[in-house]
Amino acid sequence: MSFLGEKVMRSDTNQTDVFRDSPATKAAQWRAAAEKCAEQFPGDAKRLRYYESHAEMYEAQCAQVAA
């Protein structure tokens, strides 16, 4: 993107950062979201399962790294 011939520098946030994007951090965030979902939508098992499946996926990645 340019304005009057100037190039604008963009941040590269789509690159994976090993500290910001660690599987353990993501697993904890998805697990917290699942708990909040259970509080906010007590009868919605499909929605809860969505959050839990993401948490389990990242927890499995943590187990692979540890092994």
Image: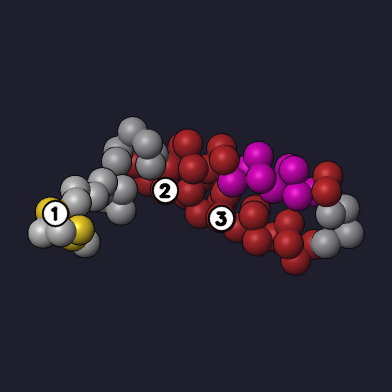
Give the position of the C terminus as an image quadrant: top left
Q: Is residue 12 left or right of residue 57?
A: left
The disc label shown at residue 61, or none = 2
Q: CA distance from mark 2 to mark 1?
A: 39 Å
Instruction: Magenta stretch: give its range.
Output: 30-38
Q: Nearer the viewer, residue 13 or 25?
A: 13
Residue that badge 3 annotates: 54
- x 33%, y 33%: residue: 19
Residue that badge 1 annotates: 7
Residue closest to the far top: 19
Q: Residues within 10 Å of mark 3 (few under 14, many from 20)?
A: some
* Element on which disc 1 rests: strand
* Element on which disc 3 rests: helix
Q: Nearer the viewer, residue 43 or 13?
A: 13
Query: Can I make out residue 67 in this image?
Result: no
Instruction: Name which of mark 3 and mark 2 comes first in the sequence.
Output: 3
Q: Position of residue 39 (x, y in %)?
A: 83, 44
Q: Nearer the viewer, residue 60 or 53?
A: 53
The disc label shown at residue 25, or none = none
User: How was the colour assigned to the protein in this rendering?
Assistant: secondary structure
- x 47%, y 36%: residue: 25
Q: CA distance from mark 3 to mark 1?
A: 38 Å
Kindly check if marks 2 and 1 are in contact, taking CB atoms under 8 A apart as contact.
Answer: no
- x 60%, y 58%: residue: 53
Kindly check if marks 3 and 1 are in contact, taking CB atoms under 8 A apart as contact.
Answer: no
Q: Is residue 43 left or right of residue 24?
A: right
Quadrant hosting residue 5: bottom left
Please name the amino acid that badge 3 sits on. Answer: His
Taking the magenta stretch, the answer to whether it contains residue 37 is: yes
